[in-house]
Amino acid sequence: MKFGKELKSQMVPEWTEAYMGYDSLKNLLKDINHFQERNRTAPLATNPPGLSRKLTLYRAFSGLTQRTVSPRTHDSESQPILVNSVKRSNGEEGYETRFLMVADEGGEYELVFFRRLDDEFNKVNKFYKGKVQEVMKEAAELNKQMDALIAFRIKVDNPKHVIFESQVEMNRLAAAAKASSEAAALTASASTAMRSRRKVDHMDVIDEDHSNTGQRSDDSFSNDAISGGVSKTRGITFRPPPLEILSHVTVNNSIETPRSTIRSVLNIPIQTDLKLTKENLSKVEEQLKRAFTEFYQRLQLLRSFSFMNMLAFSKILKKYDKITLRNASKSYLKLVDNSYIGSSDEVPKLMERVEAAFVKHFSNSNRKKGLSILRPTAKRQRHRTTAFLGFFAGCTVSLIIALILIVRARNIIQESGRDKYMNTMFPLYSLFGFIVLHMIMYAANIYFWRRYRVNYPFIFGFNQRTALGYREVLLLAFGLAALATGCVLANLDMEMEPKTGDYKAITELLPLVLVILVLLVVILPFNIIYRSSRYFLLTCIFHCICAPLYKVVLSDFFLADQFTSQVQAFRNLEFYICYYSSGDYKRRENSCKDNEVFNTFNFIVAAIPYTWRLLQCLRRFFEEKDNWQGLNGLKYLATIVAVTTRIAYSRDKSAGWNIVAWIASIIAAFSSTYWDLVWDWGLLGRTSKNRWLRDKLLVPHKSVYFVAMVLNILLRLAWLQTVLDFDVSFLHHQTLVTIVASLEIIRRGIWNFFRLENEHLNNVGKYRAFKSVPLPFNYDENEDEEDA
């Protein structure tokens, strides 16, 4: 793989603009090469065709160990460049290269190259320095959190006899230190390294852990903290946190519940006192464990950023030397090595301290277990997933073909019970068709998100190790499709077979059994069938149902948007309840359409998904003071009005309801389409360098965006089937409703890709590549100021 492609594959997607512009610098080198080729003098004599290859056979053998000699010899006074550190107008330190060979032929091309190289290096160095300063501040905060955690552990584990035990432990440690002094003296190299170890201001707790990993238990460390003194073991000074630190901290109630939301709205104070219980201790430890994990991943990304950029500068300068036959890489790379990004060692040292602290305090000194959590391995693609995917996909296709052949062979379409079947069984089974279609569209979205490097696990908040890929989603989709199609086929076969006519009640219960089975699989507590993903889905569903009692995050309102495209599926669920509770399902008869309760809930069910989104928008409007969220809420309110008026028109075919439904639907369709294209997709920009599109696009073919916009508009008009009451002679009404609902699901699938693409580009513009993990303790601000 060429380095340019490798660099792109290793980039942090949100930091793409901060990396060295390798391709642009490579293009400048191509310009230099083309200029040299145009101005290269022609050889005096031309060899006959075929002779040049033969002449090489008679050249002297240069040997295998002979070192190559540079085409030009350079001394220290004939260097082509001089690199200096300069102060810019804004006070920041930068680097500037002076090219000394401008008078040479083509020197102006090389001058442009070095100016661009300086800009790229200053950009990379500044970005890296800023990010390192950020993580050092976070390290200081984590250090304070660890101080509080250790004091918390002491209070919870042994609150009464801790002083007496601390003295005993101190005496034991002192005796152990004296007994091992001789052995410590023999290890001179290790002692020298420890004595020369630099003292840092941050992560003191982590420093002591790293210095003596595996030598002391949490209890011994805690007892030193209580004694209030400073203990020394094997020449290492420990400065444990005092227990008084707990008097300056309060609990951070980061876990939001409906109760906490209601209390905040009613201005009821929330209890933040530190309760010294083992339950609270486990919660605090879990929060800090997540914080350490996320912090370590940030350090890994910073280390990768530094390494890849250093390698990129080395590669591009070697290409320059090769093309121009100069020796500029040595002096410039020396500058790179001495710069902040090349000489700073804060990140690797901080990673070592984080590893040592995490292993000791969160994995019971089990290094292998601790590092497996901090360094999650990439998710391996299992061959069995692909094998089962192919199996279920083949089963689904085979069952669909068999179903079509049975319908054609037995001429079921012309049977007298056709209308009864379409009005009862078809809505029951079409529910699974909607779910499968939505899952297939989601799998396609994942495939294209990965192809165009959209960091969807970070945006949604998925666990990187358990996030489902498109193969896993397709496996679930085709597994459900095969199961549902098999039930349809069994239903028809049992109905048409005289031998199974007595089991009609069991036949009619197949759809209900299938629904119950799917629900049981979703809520299954066992660690099978992607449990973490299922529970994440259930959590988001619960947040949508309880809107606006939970803080709205992207995964919640994204799922609520998916529900707005599954209105027909919600109606089918309502029909399930009505059909199996009040209807005579054994004879395939029901009176749901004549039931006033069913018709009333038909209004409510259709508006539920839009109501969830409206409440989420209102929560964000009052919480974030964002007026655009208020406008977005009005858009969903208009959609609710349009949906209810269309249902009313379908019940009462009067001219008044027809006009109201037309007006409400046009307003809802126009506002929703405009919001999709402009705000959710970020398109239709007049001043953009890409006409009517964004400045930055992930898909290289611009026509894709225009086709998507046209499809979005056309598929938005699917509601015309309800307002205009289309009647297609060769399609049953239920079939037409299913097709319209499927078109809306397809439109939502297209919307998903561009919506997340726009979100990804916003994160890239703000360099947001990390999740913010709430910390368990809040420190007293006055105390912090006194310490400062």
Image: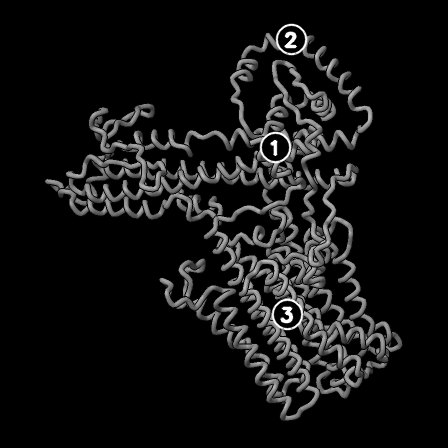
Residue count near mark 3 (Cα–Cα under 10 Å), binned few <14, some 14–19, many ≥20:
many
Q: Which is more foreground, mark 1 or mark 3? A: 1
Specify which label sits upstream in the sequence, 2 or 1.
1
Residue 564 - label: 3
The residue tagged 2 is: 181
161 displayed left or right of 50: right
| Residue 172 placement: quadrant | top right
The residue tagged 1 is: 143
Label 2 to label 1: alpha-carbon separation? 30 Å
Label 1 SS: helix
Residue 727 visible in the snapshot: no
Label 3 SS: helix
Residue count near mark 1 (Cα–Cα under 10 Å), binned few <14, some 14–19, many ≥20:
some
157 relative to 452, above or below:
above
Q: Residue at x 62, y 65 (%)?
A: 618
Q: Residue at x 66, y 17 (%)?
A: 231
